[in-house]
Structure formats: structure tokens, C-alpha cells
Image (cartoon, coloured by chain):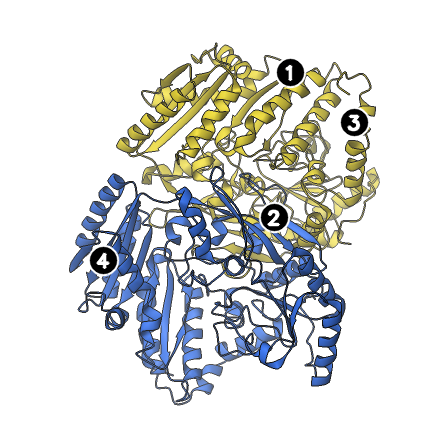
Chain colours: A blue, B yellow
Amino acid sequence: MQEPAPQTALNAEQRAMLQEILRGALDGMTLLTAENELKAYECDALTVFTRPPLAVALPETEAQVQAVLQTCSGLGIPVTVRGAGTGLTGSGTATPDGLLLAMARFNRILKIDPQARTATVEPGVRNQAVSDAAAPYGLFYAPDPSSQLACTIGGNIAQNAGGLHCLKYGLTTHNVLKIRAVLMDGGIIELGGEAYDAPGLDLLPLFIGSEGMFAAVTEVVLKLLPKPQTAQVIQASFADMGKAGRAVADIIAEGIIPAGLEMMDGASTRAVDDYLHAGFDREAEALLLCESDGMAEEVEAEIGKIRHILTRAGATSLKVSRNEIERTAIWAGRKSVFPAAARLAPDSYCMDGTIPRRKIGEMLDFTDGLSKKYRLQCINVFHAGDGNMHPLILFDNQAGEWPRAEAFGAEILRRCVQLGGTITGEHGVGLEKIDGMCAQFGEGERAAFWGIKAAFDPEMLLNRDKKLPLKTRCAEYARTFDGGGIAAKFPDLEYF
Amino acid sequence: MQEPAPQTALNAEQRAMLQEILRGALDGMTLLTAENELKAYECDALTVFTRPPLAVALPETEAQVQAVLQTCSGLGIPVTVRGAGTGLTGSGTATPDGLLLAMARFNRILKIDPQARTATVEPGVRNQAVSDAAAPYGLFYAPDPSSQLACTIGGNIAQNAGGLHCLKYGLTTHNVLKIRAVLMDGGIIELGGEAYDAPGLDLLPLFIGSEGMFAAVTEVVLKLLPKPQTAQVIQASFADMGKAGRAVADIIAEGIIPAGLEMMDGASTRAVDDYLHAGFDREAEALLLCESDGMAEEVEAEIGKIRHILTRAGATSLKVSRNEIERTAIWAGRKSVFPAAARLAPDSYCMDGTIPRRKIGEMLDFTDGLSKKYRLQCINVFHAGDGNMHPLILFDNQAGEWPRAEAFGAEILRRCVQLGGTITGEHGVGLEKIDGMCAQFGEGERAAFWGIKAAFDPEMLLNRDKKLPLKTRCAEYARTFDGGGIAAKFPDLEYF
């Protein structure tokens, strides 16, 4: 069997010895091993899982990356590659007693080629910096996760990041042409290319979204797109989420692919309005934001069509942005849902499931039921166009509500799978959703995943405890869910 | 090492014995073993490599596919999955002493879902049949290889087939949502889904274009697109290929993505005109065909822009199709280049390399030089928009010209790789271009390919001698090319 073998934890003495060996082997490179330095790297943005790494390496050249991986390979030390640490699922948190390979110093934009419309960058470059560098040529890099000011291209590749505009412009996997990476044995691998088709096996999509399990990326060629001449966004209010959901289906059914198509429920709309005073419709029980971009006349025609569809679908009010300031303000509102929610409850747990668009109504009913069952409020925002939902479960950790929030989330993800969707749209699996992978995939698929991991990393050292569950873990998951384990865990819940 | 072990050929007695065992094990299924029946399955459309299979199985249900694969797995018999046999590289030709798993009877369209815009089909369904079934709903299936009347969806998946319209609508990999397949051990695997993103590892693109090396596909969900309201094609004549090549770059640089963008040289244009009397410009040394599709007003505007660009790029004459009959006739002409070429020479060898668009001129000069070096005529047609070139090398097999044609082709492919392109755009690797894979990929990538093959097919029984070269073979290739082996093979050629 190709799964990694279990590991026992090191004691303080063993850790100190390994740190000493690493310092000797990686002389000339920044290597952090002091307690207080390691503390800063103990987690990514999923702060409930903390693990101080054995050491943090900050290489500056590809040769140094090779040295780190070869050294760790020789010593059997697990390695986790880390970008900006903005990930929401723990992918960038170290494996126990593992080294953290931080790519922060790979932060150069190597080339913008306006003719070929490509950007060649190092993985530590921030997402927004690519579009900034491309702007003088009238180009931009399309994937725009909400964290784009901070998150890096390497992390975007690890998670196959999306964003508000991915319905029209695709996810990271649709916007990366080529990557160069270092394998655990120090070997270099290049995947993809500028030509339209890849011969051999198409490994590039396999690496994008692989959460650092195969290799450490050192260079990336990104696709750039011409910046649309103009863009406008419509805000439509609805009396309930079901109606808004049907409007989404209607827009898509007309063959329109909006640049963005977002849905917010009444609670999140009011939370944002309290937070930003952005003039959102506080009476609406559902708000739809629909953007059109392109040539001015195309946008005008499309906005006209969308208005017509939304009115027919029962919108109670429509508002179209009149200029860039209004348009930007609307999107800033949408992007502020999570900080705004912090005013509603001390803690929140953001889910990231996807479902086929036509199931939106059904899923909302289900979430409502869970909200009653677990006695926790849940507010809903959706990348509605691509069926990527972000229910935000509100709870109070100090009041001991986390286990209920966690179970609430697990049930949502399981339902996503049952409805023909997935447990993650853009945040990845990491540590957080590793049990969800048991719901998502059968034993055959999981065995294939481990087999593929072994093809690139036979010693199973790269991010070994993320994303892919062990057989034993899935057996435990099955017992919990199918054997009534959840009911046993929460005997006081009224809905069981 | 994970490469397959070498196999020794069976003698007649051993073949007969295995056939007898197969007949017993696969009772109730059509199994061909008679010499004359096997003869009909000895090759695909690459007729220079013939190998009568050990047996041909024609299952009708998924359970029968499982039975065939499990039985062969138990007996150690290699298996090749076959669609319509229209492939150009030998992927559908049996491995020596191997069984051919012919999917011809999996020919049902299971569902057309106009709401979700999907078609669920079996792999033996012909490409054209999908669009025919979708037409009543105003939908179509986009990939349109020239063989679309005969080739099947299963074969399209195996080769990641493209077509005349793939610049705008993508290759097979961009138009398949989900596949279900049987692994060599009889296990079922499902990849992809209707949701926008895939959690876990994105294995679907890995399977598409894998040339039957991982599993036998039994069911496919395809994406359907709304049929464009209208389409028009411009024919532009140029005095040389270089100018036409630059016009291609100009069109793309303006941000236009034509539905089709094809280039033919003077020789192929005249050959087609002799063949079809289609009214092509016989004086042109280069012909560009550029199609626009969409809403009537969009097409009119786009055709106007393209006209302007082509005139500025030096087109000597322009002709726009005025109706569907004229448009269809132009594409019929383009699709007839290969049959038309049969009038120029007894045999032809069709190459399928890709290059970055901006390298078209450089590549044409190189091909011209090779044409003189090998003293063989070569006519050129291009899917210019996506840089996929199909040089057609003309030769006379009876006059012993094949080895020169083969070496000519090998040099073209090697140059494609050097220019940043690939050895195959849409025909695949198969038996024909297996040496080209040595030029395309380094040892690290090739080892990863074998590792991935082992993850799905650890016994290395599925299409084991196609697509992926053994290390020993690449060593031999390096000796031939880099050690002056080609010059030694052709001492009479003037250019060495």
C-alpha cells in the first residue's frame, strides 16, 4: 500500500539535534529554529490548528530550494511549502516535526510579455502585484481571490484559487500556462508550455490544486488578459433566496456569462451595510450582484438583457452602477462580508462547498434546517454563477460552541457531495476538510491519489498529512456518520 | 524502476491456448479469434504498423468490460482499447499478442439535458452524432476533428481531439465534464463532475489524451454549447506564407478569437481546387480562412475588423461567404486537403506538431530547407490560430522513400520542441511518435509518467507500448540524433 507510514513525535532532544544538522547542511541560507521565530509560523489563516515547525527555511535561489529538499529527503524530514499563509484550511501549516519551506523571497516578476500576453513570475509574488505590473500594457491577471492583496501566486497554484470573476475568466488552473518546480529528490520538473496542447500526460492541472504535495514551484508563466474597456454591476433585491437562485439560473440559461454573479442573503447584506454604510438594500432578503464587462456597447446591451431577466424573475428593486466609484464600492461591500460578520458573533467558520447551480434553493433549505438543529446562526454568500457557496457559521468558541459548528460544517459538505457538488470550491482541503475527502471520493479514487503522490514523492515527505486522508481515517469517518456517531456526540440536539 | 518489463513473443501454440482460455472465461460475449476476423483489426489509420491482435472482445455492458479486464489481468494479457480506428498514430493498434477491447457496441446516447447543457453518452458514440442529437435544442458539441463523421467520443478522449473550431471552443479536455471508467483490476473510477471545481487531484485532464493507458471509459458527460446564431468566413489571399503568418498574429493581437483560423499554402490550395473545383484562389501562395460566429450584429462588426486587419497585413484579395452554402463549401475544401494530396504523390505522411504562433514563419523556412535536404515535397496546412501545423510530406513508398519521409518528419517534430512547441497537437503519440517523446520530455518527466501509469495500471497491461518510451529507447534516440546517426543512415543526402 502506498499510504505514508505513521510517524512518532520527536522529543525535545531529537528536535534540537535535527535542527543542528539542518543548520550545518543549509549553511548560508536563512534558517529559523528559535522558539519565538517558529511561533510566527505555527499556522496559516485557519488558526484552530497550530503546530510550530521544526525549522523554517527561507531560500532565495532555486539551488537553495534543491538543497533544502535534498537535505530533508536524506534525513526523512517532512516538508510543507508555504506562500503568504493566507490559506483557510491549514495547507500551509507544517506537518508535525516538519520543516516549513517559506517561498517569501521568491518575489520577483521576471517578465511581462505584452505580445504573448504572459507574465513570468516567482511563486512568492502577490496576486495583485501581477495585475499591477501588467496594467501599463492594458492587461490583467484574472483570478482574484478576496485575499489578493496578500496571497501569492504559489499559494494560488497550490489551492487552484478562484475569485469573484472566475465564472467568466476561470480559476487558477485556466490561467497558468507553465510551471517549473523542484521535486523532493532535488530534480527539476517543467510542466505545461505556451503551445495550445500538451503531449504526454497533462500534469499541469494535476499540480494546480495539489496543495504542495508534489513539488516546490519556483517559476510560473501566467496568462494575461486584455482589461475590459468598461464594466457595470447591477444590484437586484429579492424577497427570498429561492427567487434570487432562480434568477441566477435564468441568466445562465439565456447564454449570458456575467463577469461576476454573486448572491448574499438578508443577514449578510445588513451586516455589510452596518459595517460599511454602503447603501445596500436592508429590506432585501436576497441580493444579487451581476457584473457585465467588455466593449461599452456590448455592456450596455448585456445590462439591458439582464435587467429584463431580473425583472421577470421578480426582483423588487434594481440599481445599476453609474461609474467606477459606485462599481468598486459594491464589490468592496461584497468582499467585506466576513469582516462584517465579526460584529454578529465572536467566531465564524467559513465553508466552501460547490453545488450544481440548479440545487441552490434545495441547499439553502437544508442549511436552514441545520441552523435550527445546531442552534447556530449561518449567513450565506455565494459565488452563485459557479455554484460555489460560502455559508458562514457563526459561533462562540469560549461558550464551547466549536464542536457544534464543526459538525454543522461537516453536514453541509456531505450534502454538497450528495447534490453532485464538491467539498471545496477554492479554499482547498488542507487539514480542515480531510474528512470531507472520505465523503467525496471512493476507495478507488483515493488509492489512485496516493499512487500519484508516490510517483512524485515516493518517500511521502511533502505535506504528507494534508488533503489526502488515510484509509483508517475514512473508516473512522464512516463510523461517525453512518453509524450514528454524530447523534451520540450531541445527545442534547433536538433534531436527532 | 516502474517501466514495463520486456516481453517475449508467443508462438502459435501459446496463442491458440490463450485464445481457448479467453473463450472459456468470456463466454456469452462476442470474442473474435479467427485469423480472417483479426486481420480486420490489425491496425488503425496508421497503416504502416500492423499487428493482428490475440483476440478482439466486443462487450456490450460495463460488467462485460470488467470481465474482460479482470480476465486479462489474471492471465497477464496486454489490452488495447479501441474506438472507431480512425486514429493516425497507432494508439488503437493492439500490443503484440494483446487483446483488443473494441467499444463499438457502447453506442448509445443516454441523455441530452438542454437545461444543464450536457450530453451523457457511451464512448462508442460518433462525434457527429452528439451534435445531431443536440441540434433540436439549439445546442452542439464543439470539438470537430476532420474525421467527426466516423470517429467516436472514446477515441476523442483518448487523443484529446481538437478540430477546426478548437481555438475558440477548446479541445476535448475543455468540453468533457465527467467520465466513468473501468480499471485493469475491474474497479470503477469516476472523474470530474458537473460542479465548477474538482477537489482532490484533478485527474480528468490526466485521462483525457492518455491514449488508453489508464482505464477503459464506459460513460461520458459532455458539455454542450448554444449553436451560434450565424457564422461567416473570410478567405484572404497572400503573396507568401510569412505575410499570412503575420496576419494571424495581428488578428490575435487585436483581441479577436475567431471561431476558426486556418492557413493553407499555395500547393495545398491548388491541390484542393483541382480536386473539388471549389473556386479557391489558385494564384495565392498562402490562403487564410478566418471565421466569425455569434449574434448577427457581432459577426458583422467582427468581420469588418478582420477585413481591416487583413488588408493592412497585405492581403491581395478578400472574399467573404455570403450564405451557409458558401461557408460550408469553404470548410469542405479545407477538410479535403489530405484526400486532394493523394493526387500529388502515391503516399503521404501527416505531421501534427504545434509551435507558438509567432514562430510560424521560422518553422516554414525550416520545413522548406528539409524539403530540399530530403528531396521530398511537403505541403502545409495549419490550424494557425492555435499554432497546430499539419505539414504533409509526400513520398513514394514503392520507390523506397519512406525512411527519408520518416526522418524528415522526425526533424520537424524535434524542431517544434526546440521552438517551444510540442510533437503533437491533436493526433496523439501512439506508436508513431514515441521517439518524439524523448525529444519532448526529460528523464524526470518520463519517470513521473511511468509512476502515474503504475498508480492506475500497476501490471502495465493497458496499451503498454504506446505513448511512453522506455529509457532504453530514448537512449537509442539520443544516439541517433545527437551522435550523427541520421547522417550515417542517409549518406547520399546533400545537406549533411
| Mark 1 on the same chain as mark 4 | no
Q: Chain of mark 4?
A: A
Q: Which mark is residue B486?
A: 3
**Mark 3: few, some, or many residues within 10 Å (few <14, many ≥20)?**
some
Horizontal arrangement in the rendering, residue B227 relative to residue A17 (left or right): left
Q: Is residue B182 above or below residue B249?
A: below
Spatial CA span between label 2 and label 3: 29 Å
SS label for mark 3 = helix
Q: Amino acid at mark 3?
A: Ile
SS label for mark 1 = loop
Q: Which mark is residue A340?
A: none
Spatial CA span between label 4 and label 2: 42 Å
Q: Nearer the viewer, mark 1 or mark 4?
A: 4
Q: Amino acid at mark 2?
A: Leu
**Mark 2: few, some, or many residues within 10 Å (few <14, many ≥20)?**
many
Residue lying furthest front in this view? A28
Q: Nearer the viewer, residue A242 or A434?
A: A434
Q: Chain of mark 3?
A: B
Location of residue B421 in the rendering, given as x and y in whole percent from the top left corner: 60, 36
Q: Quadrant of the C terminus of chain A?
A: bottom left
Residue located beneath label 4 in the image: A235
Residue located beneath label 1 in the image: B377
SS label for mark 4 = strand
